[in-house]
Image: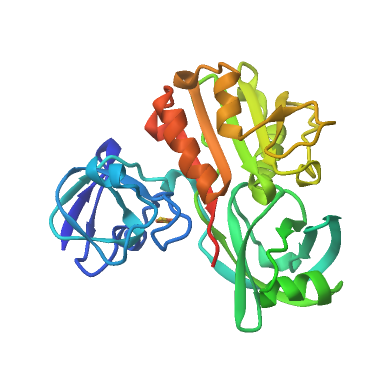
């Protein structure tokens, strides 16, 4: 048994065979996480003191991260007492993960390779989540992870799902799924959700269907907008072609500076061209006074993190949820 010390004088006891993430959960603490497989970086933590062992390769870390003393708590077991520069999130009242039935309420193509799916959950299921979290959708013996694209104040769960081709689940959703099909959902999962901040700028990066949790968070901000009056909210939504930008913000209570960005825009495209992380630098936003939420491809997340932190963003002001292929 080892003692794990966190920011704000929080500590817990972790067994040597448990990962730090699981040890924290056993003690009713919540640390940042998403994939739990060492690939997405959500659980990245700076070691201030102590030693630990990686039980699988930490592919989410760069060589520089490792040199600078970062670990991924989802795949590390302690080998001594540890002091980590991360915080406990249990004050956010995250719901326990559970599995419940659901039925397809709506399914429709919204671009050539993305569908919008609505799942109806039983009224007595009391399925609550924080906007930005994701779930696993289960059909038979296979399951896939998808971010919920709306707030928990709605009766249905909404998803944007991209067809990556070839997989059994994609084949089912794009060719066979119909209204009232019975599925199971497991969740809510992950810690990608909005946290109140004293910083002035709130910036979102999304690529492709990574817009789903960002849309949910923005909807929640629109519903609870009183402390956002003096904030500048930016959404950089990136895609290859115009049809990838299948959603745009339209809110009554918050003003969102919407910057669509195409990496392969044709000659008619008048918007920004390139990658979201490069465009944010061109906009001269003071990154030292910014929190940034990024959801989308692993490469976008990795590049964004490096580039924005190099340009003034605080390390602990970068929140991400990377889409990991399974
Ligand atoms: S790398 Fe640990 S949760 Fe994804």
Q: Is residue 298 or residue 134 the one in the foreground?
A: 298
Residue 196 visible in the picture: no
- At a point 58% along the width and 20% down the height, the residue shown is 282
Question: Dividing the picture into quarters, in which one does residue 79 lie?
Answer: bottom left
Q: Is residue 273 or residue 47 the one in the foreground?
A: 273
- 127 over 236 or under it: above or below: below
- At a point 72% along the width and 59% down the height, the residue shown is 161
Residue furthest toward the front? 267
Residue 297 visible in the picture: yes
- 93 over 205 or under it: above or below: below
- 270 over 207 or under it: above or below: above
In percent of width and height, residue 223 lies at 71, 35
For the C terminus, the quadrant is: bottom right
Relative side of 156 to 146, left or right: right
In percent of width and height, residue 31 lies at 38, 50
In percent of width and height, residue 174 lies at 79, 69
């Amino acid at each position: 048994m080892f003692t794990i010390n966190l920011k704000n004088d929080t500590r817990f006891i972790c067994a040597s065979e448990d990962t730090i993430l699981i040890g924290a959960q056993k003690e009713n603490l919540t640390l940042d996480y998403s994939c739990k497989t060492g690939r997405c970086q959500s659980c990245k933590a700076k070691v201030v003191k102590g030693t630990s062992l990686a039980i699988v390769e930490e592919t989410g870390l760069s060589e520089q991260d490792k040199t600078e003393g970062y670990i991924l708590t989802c795949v590390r077991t302690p080998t001594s007492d540890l002091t980590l520069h991360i915080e406990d999130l249990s004050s956010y009242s995250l719901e326990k993960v559970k599995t419940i039935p659901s039925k397809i309420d709506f399914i429709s193509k919204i671009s050539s390779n993305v569908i919008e799916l609505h799942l109806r959950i039983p009224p007595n299921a009391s399925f609550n989540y924080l906007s930005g979290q994701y779930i696993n959708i289960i059909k038979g013996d296979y399951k896939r992870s998808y971010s919920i694209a709306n707030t928990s104040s709605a009766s249905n769960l909404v998803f944007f799902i991209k067809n990556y081709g070839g997989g059994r689940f994609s084949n089912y959703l794009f060719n066979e799924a119909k209204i009232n099909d019975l599925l199971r959902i497991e969740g809510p999962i992950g810690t990608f959700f909005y946290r109140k901040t004293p910083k002035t700028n709130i910036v979102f990066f999304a690529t492709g269907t990574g817009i789903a949790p960002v849309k949910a968070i923005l909807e929640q901000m629109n519903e609870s907008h009183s402390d956002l009056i003096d904030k500048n909210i930016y959404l950089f939504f990136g895609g290859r072609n115009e049809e990838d930008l299948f959603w745009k913000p339209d809110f009554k209570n918050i003003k969102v500076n919407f910057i669509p960005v195409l990496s392969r825009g044709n000659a008619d495209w008048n918007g920004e061209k390139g990658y979201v992380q490069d465009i944010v630098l061109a906009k001269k936003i003071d990154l030292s006074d910014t929190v940034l939420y990024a959801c989308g491809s692993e490469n976008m997340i990795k590049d964004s993190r490096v580039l924005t932190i190099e340009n003034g963003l605080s390390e602990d002001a970068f929140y991400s949820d990377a889409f990991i292929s399974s």
